[in-house]
Image (tube, helix red, strand yellow):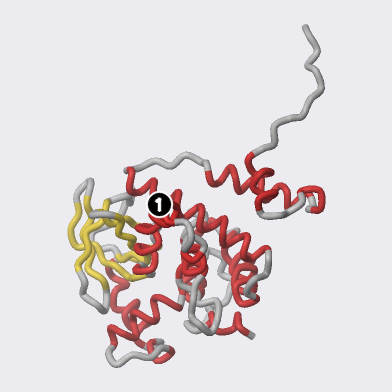
Amino acid sequence: MKKRKPGKKPAANWLEALKKMNLDPNKLEFKELKAFRDLELYLNKPVKGTKEFKYLIYCFRYLTSFALMTIYENRFSSLSNCWYELERLFLHDETFDDEVFVQSWIFCDFPVNANKKTVLDYFEEIFVDNEDNLNIFKNFIESMKKSRLGLYQEILSSKKIIKFRELFTGKIVKAENTIPKYEKGEIFLTRLVEIGEKTYLFGDPKCWPKEYKAQLEFMVETKLFYFQGSTIEEKYEQFMKHAGPYWMSCVVSDQNIPILQPDHYLTYFK
């Protein structure tokens, strides 16, 4: 067998990416290098589903990579505070192993500064001078900006489509049925994202039997005072947009984690 001649080994894509970001791999710790390597594997992990769903997930992975770099650079202390606390409390819990439930709230809903901009807003800004890339991510960005968590009750379903009525707003929504098993009238805490003419449940929904409807409505109604709005529907919209950590603490499997306040996100600015 011939010995391979020594030569320059082609750099991995993730190493090339580091260089483009002016980061010297030789100055990074092993755990940091491993994180970047794992990120590349994450970005390229296969996705099953329709072309719209694949587009949604792949775009979110790029948003995640941008967000993690922003956190690594400590660009916004509020974002870093938010990420590290929610990572400690929730990301290691099996309830949130879908890789999007917690992350989508942090990146798409949490206002990182006084301008109330989110990581998603800053992700959009990097494409201002690159129209080709902006066109790739445009539909994703617009769809995620419109999305939020919501409480949806199943009212009619088939193998392909599930129809919901949202609590408080009464809005009827038809989504692609990606829930493997559920009961009639079950209530779901989930984020619905519309891509093209299809609507998808983003991540694994958290659910309650229909018998819990009154209890859930009462639980939300007694906490709407945390947010401003001229109607219950408007307060509910604000509640579901900003109370992500509260909902995470309600559904996490670890009973030792306390229930967080609906406006807990404000503590990240202190």
Residue labelled with disc 1? 136
Residue 203 visible (yes or no):
no
Position of residue 12 in the picture relative to residue 110 (left or right):
right
Residue 234 in the image: x percent, y percent?
31, 84
Q: Secondary structure at mark 1?
A: helix
Residue in the picture at 54% in, 82% down: 264
Which quarter shows the N terminus? Answer: top right
**Residue 231 location (% of width, % of height):** 27, 90
Q: How many discs mark residues in the rendered view? A: 1
Toward the viewer: 82 or 252?
82
Figure check: 25 above or below 261: above
Quarter residue 183 falls in: bottom left
Q: Residue at x 55, y 84 (%)?
A: 266
Q: Nearer the viewer, residue 38 or 250?
A: 38
Can you name the residue that lies furthest to the top here? 1
- Residue 47 on image: x %, y %: 43, 42
**Left or right: 36 with respect to 118?**
right
Report which quarter residue 4 is drawn in.
top right
Amino acid type of the residue that numbered disc 1 sits on in the rendered structure: Ile
Task: Give the quadrant of the C terminus.
Answer: bottom right
Q: Which residue occupies 41% across, 87% down? A: 223
Name the residue: 39% across, 48% down. Answer: 55
- How packed is label 1: few (under 14 Cα within 10 Å), some, or many (20 or more)? few
Indicate the position of residue 79 as horizontal and vertical percent values: 60, 72
Seen from the viewer's position, the closer of residues 94 and 31 is 31
Q: Residue furthest front?
A: 129
Look at the image and tell me whether residue 165 can be seen: yes
149 is higher (above) or lower (below) than 262: above
